[in-house]
Structures are given as C-alpha cells and as structure tokens.
Image (spheres, grey):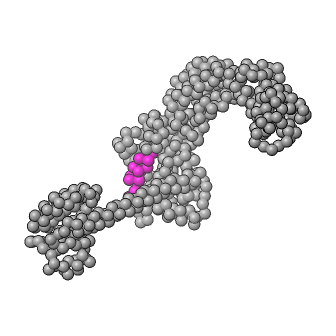
C-alpha cells in the first residue's frame, strides 16, 4: 500500500481531497495533510511518504522549493504539483525538472484519481522491480557462497586449477586472493557445548564463527572462510597490500587467534580449538597445511580447546595410544555380537566409554571404525543390510554427527545394537521372506526356460523338497502350483492381447509340446487355448 501527503496553505483543498477521494480503491493506505512546506518536511521525516502532492504558491516557501528539498533527501519520492492557470507554463517547466506530474486548480476529482492512480502504478512497478533485483542479488550471493565453498573444498583436497583460471575464479567470486600470495590457514574445531548440538545448529555456529573471524582479521588482512567436508571451519588469511610486515609475525597471529576464541566465547557461549599454520604460498601448499592441521586437531581433547601454532607443535604433549583395548579384551565385541549377547555387547561399549576419559577426534574415529566393522560383519552373517534398518546407518557421507562426541557415538552405537538385535530375533522370518521373494522373481523372469521346482531350488541353493515345503508354509500355495498359475496367467494375457500362434505361446512359456500346453490350459480354465481366444 501507498502513503500520500497533501500540502496546501488553503486547508480546505487538502481536507476536501482527504474526504472525497476513494483512497483505498486506488491503492492508497495513509493520507496525511500539511499547511506549509515546513510542516510538510516534518511529516516527511516522521512518516514514510510515497507521494507528495503540493501547491506551487505558498507563503514562506513555494511548492517547487519543497519538492527540491524533498527530492534531495528522498530521491524515490513521487511528486505532483497543484497549479492555477496563471502558473501553467511555469508548472510545465518545473515538471520537466523535478515534479512527476501536475494538476490544475480547482482540482477535478476524476483527474486527481487518474493522476494518483498513475503514480501508484509507477510505485508498484518500481517496488516489484526492486524486489526482483534484490531476489536476484540474494540468489547471486547465495550461489557465490556455494561456489566459494566448492572452490575451497577443491583446494583443500589438493585439486589444482591452472593459475590463470584460478585467478579468474577468485576475481569472479570477489575473493581478494591471488596465486603465489603469502597466506596462513586457521583450521577451527568446535569444542565444549557446541559438540552436543544437532547438525543444523552446528552449521549455523560454523557460519557465525566465519563471520566473527572476518570481523577480527578484516582490517590488516584479506579473509576467506568456509566450512570443510571434515566438519571444521577453515579461515584463509592474507596480508593486504601496503600493510606492515609485522602483522605477519607469530605474536600478532597468536593474539588475533586468541581474540577470535574470546569473541566466540562471548558472542556464542562456546569454545573452539584453532590450529594456525605457518605462512605459505597460496594455493600450492594449502592442502599440505590443512592435512597437518587435521592430524593435530584429531588428537586434541574435545573438552580442552587449544590454540596451536604449528611451529610450537613439537612442544605439545598429544596422546596417541590406542583407545580400543577394552573392546578387544576377550570376549571381544565381535564375539558377543556373533553369539547374540546384545546386552553384554552394550556393557562392553559402556566400559570402553567410561574407561577412556580423554576423548579426541582420533580416538572417536578409531572407535567408530571398530564398532561399525563389528556391526557390518555380524549383519552380513545374518543376511541383513544395515541400510535397510537405518538409511543413514554407517554412511559417513550422509551423517557424521554421531562421531562428534563420545556421547553421540555411544548413543548411535546403542541404537544400532537395538535395531540389529530386533533383526536377529526376526532373522529366521526375514530369511524365509527373502527366499520367497527370490523364488517369485526367478519364476517371473524365467518362464521361457526350463522352470521347475528343481531348477528354482538350485538357483537359491536349497533342496527341492525343503523349498517346496517352505514355499507352501509361507504362501499357502505349492511352488509347482505357483509356477503353473503364473504361466497360465501369462498365457491368458497373450491370448487376449497378441496375435501369436498357440505354438509360439507354448514355446514362450517354456512348454515343449503344444498338446500338453493345451491340456494344462483346459484343466486350469475349462477350455482349450483356441476356444478361449474365440470367446
């Protein structure tokens, strides 16, 4: 909707317009009045006015002077002049300069409505165009953020573009980095309470940390931040041109990294670990420094955030001994799963998580691999696909959140054990249903070959007698009867919908003799194939 301001020192003019014009019908929401240019400027400052309608001749300040001042401060404001016949030529010249339209006094209601409706239409079109431009700009920014992230992922993995192409992409994505520029890489790992959040919340935190880093390092540096595929925030930093070399000193970077940690604690109420690389040539050594940072971060306790300057790494004491001794003690975790001792397997996991007080990313990954290997091995022996009972299951590409903390990994492990134990209890029924499905698929696909109980049994690696008994028990129909029924149903279809001869149908259904086929068909439907077709 549109708001309008009516200005005239003869107040009856504005009052009459305010009362008689059907404002809502022409798209005007708010109607305001002023008796002088000074009063009008006060209204303009207090209200969001879209259209200004003003008389030319007013004491102290003319309508043209009012429009001049208003246009300077609110360029998008639409203006209309009210003028008498004696000022007509003057008004025409003024319109060419500043005003959008003019009306002759005394004002005709119909002419006024047409004029204001025209201005409302122009405003509506302008707003629509601005919304489209803003939408396009937002889409471009969103797309640019995705492209920046994808480019960063490639560079972190060591995938190198030709220098000229890389420089062109950096410029296109509005990144102030160039090939062979001296850079340092900050790799950030969430810690403390952040690790208990769900994936969407963590993504918001990572984005916020990137923005805080940009504010912290912006003045003397170029900054490019992104999330990595290994659940970290990476921040690439380069000195701006003309900045003193002292800003590249270890002391300066350490002070800024500490400031980033403090700001994250103040603004986001959480902790982070940071590994800061030495200075290197971009992008040649980026992947190498990122891999070194990951190795370091995986060995840092998640409940004790640190700031690690890579040249100080040798002084750090980072534990690297195996965390899985409890799982490998007899009876092993896999032994318990094989024997269906689900509660004992859970107890062993609980003992592992309790005994291992210092949980690092490295230990959690190691534990995840051992636990998932046990689950996959036993599920395979049971003939169960883990993805069928949990679509995410052990697929790290879908969800890595269950490895972020010991609490997450423990909950995930217990949940998978519960799901697998249910399948173990139902495995006998599962195997039978799976065999029935296999048999029916084989019969459906291979009617044209020697399809018999024996050939089907051979294909599913079962004795024919056992298979026949199993099929009857599960479906209530013997396997031999099922094969005949499927053949007869297909025969009926071909008799109805094709012009194939009887001997052709006989061969296609796997029968050797047309007379025998006719005999079976008549026994099943009470008439021969020819008689059925004639009906």
Quadrant of residue 92 within the rendered picture: bottom left
What span is colored magenta in the figure? 206-222
Image point (82%, 20%), residue name: 465
Magenta residue check for 213: yes
Position of residue 241 measured from the top left corner of the image (x, y, whole percent): 43, 65
**Viewer-proximal residue among 70 and 156:** 70
Residue at the image point whose x is 55% and y is 44% from the top: 230
At a point 20% along the width and 77% down the height, the residue shown is 91
Q: Picture coordinates of residue 330 (x, y %)?
A: 66, 20
In screen coordinates, is 171 left or right of 344?
left
Q: Nearer the viewer, residue 181 or 122?
A: 122
Q: Is residue 364 above or below residue 276?
A: above
37 sits to left or right of 402: left
Q: Nearer the viewer, residue 482 or 468?
A: 482
- Quadrant position of residue 23: bottom left
Task: Determine whether, in the image, residue 73 is placed left or right of residue 370.
Answer: left
């Amino acid at each position: 909707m549109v708001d309008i301001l009516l200005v005239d020192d003869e107040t009856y003019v504005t009052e009459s317009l305010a009362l008689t014009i059907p404002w809502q019908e022409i798209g005007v929401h708010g109607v305001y009045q002023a008796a002088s240019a000074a009063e009008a400027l006060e209204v303009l400052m207090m209200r969001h006015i879209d259209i200004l309608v003003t008389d030319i001749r007013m004491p102290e300040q003319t309508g043209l002077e009012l429009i001049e001042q208003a246009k300077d401060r609110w360029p998008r404001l639409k203006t209309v002049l009210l003028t008498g016949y004696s000022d007509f030529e003057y008004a025409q010249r003024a319109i060419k300069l500043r005003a959008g339209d003019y009306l002759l006094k005394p004002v005709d209601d119909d002419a006024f409505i047409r004029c204001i409706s025209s201005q409302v239409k122009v405003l509506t079109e302008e707003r629509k165009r601005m919304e489209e431009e803003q939408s396009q700009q937002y889409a471009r920014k969103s797309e640019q953020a995705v492209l920046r992230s994808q480019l960063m992922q490639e560079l972190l993995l060591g995938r190198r573009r030709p220098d000229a192409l890389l420089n062109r992409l950096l410029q296109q994505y509005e990144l102030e980095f160039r090939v062979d520029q001296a850079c340092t890489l900050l790799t950030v790992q969430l810690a403390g309470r952040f690790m208990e959040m769900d994936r969407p919340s963590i993504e918001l935190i990572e984005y916020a940390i990137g923005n805080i880093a940009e504010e912290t390092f912006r003045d003397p540096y170029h900054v490019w931040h992104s999330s990595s595929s290994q659940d970290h925030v990476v921040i690439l930093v380069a000195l701006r041109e003309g900045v003193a070399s002292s800003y590249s000193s270890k002391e300066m970077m350490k002070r800024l990294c500490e400031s980033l940690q403090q700001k994250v604690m103040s603004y986001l109420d959480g902790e982070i670990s940071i590994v800061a690389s030495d200075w290197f040539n971009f992008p040649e050594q980026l992947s190498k420094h990122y891999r070194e940072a990951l190795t370091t971060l995986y060995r840092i306790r998640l409940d004790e955030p640190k700031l690690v300057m890579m040249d100080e790494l040798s002084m750090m004491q980072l534990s690297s001994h195996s965390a899985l001794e409890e799982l490998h003690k007899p009876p092993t975790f896999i032994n318990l799963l094989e024997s269906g001792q689900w509660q004992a397997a859970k107890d062993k996991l609980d003992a592992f998580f309790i005994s291992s007080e210092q949980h690092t990313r490295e230990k959690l990954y190691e534990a995840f691999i051992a636990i998932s290997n046990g689950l996959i091995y036993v599920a395979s022996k049971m003939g169960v696909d883990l993805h069928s009972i949990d679509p995410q299951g052990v697929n790290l590409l879908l969800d890595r959140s269950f490895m972020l903390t010991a609490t997450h990994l423990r909950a995930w492990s217990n949940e998978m054990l519960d799901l697998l134990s249910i399948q173990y209890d139902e495995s006998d029924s599962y195997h039978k249903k799976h065999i029935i499905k296999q048999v029916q698929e084989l019969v459906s696909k291979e009617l044209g070959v020697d399809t018999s109980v024996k050939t089907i049994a051979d294909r599913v690696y079962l004795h024919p007698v056992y298979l026949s008994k199993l099929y009857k028990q599960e479906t209530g129909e013997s396997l031999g009867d099922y094969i005949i029924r499927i053949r007869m149903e297909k025969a009926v279809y071909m008799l109805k919908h094709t012009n194939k001869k009887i001997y052709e149908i006989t061969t296609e259904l796997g029968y050797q003799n047309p007379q025998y086929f006719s005999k079976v068909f008549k026994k099943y439907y009470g008439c021969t194939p020819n008689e059925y077709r004639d009906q």
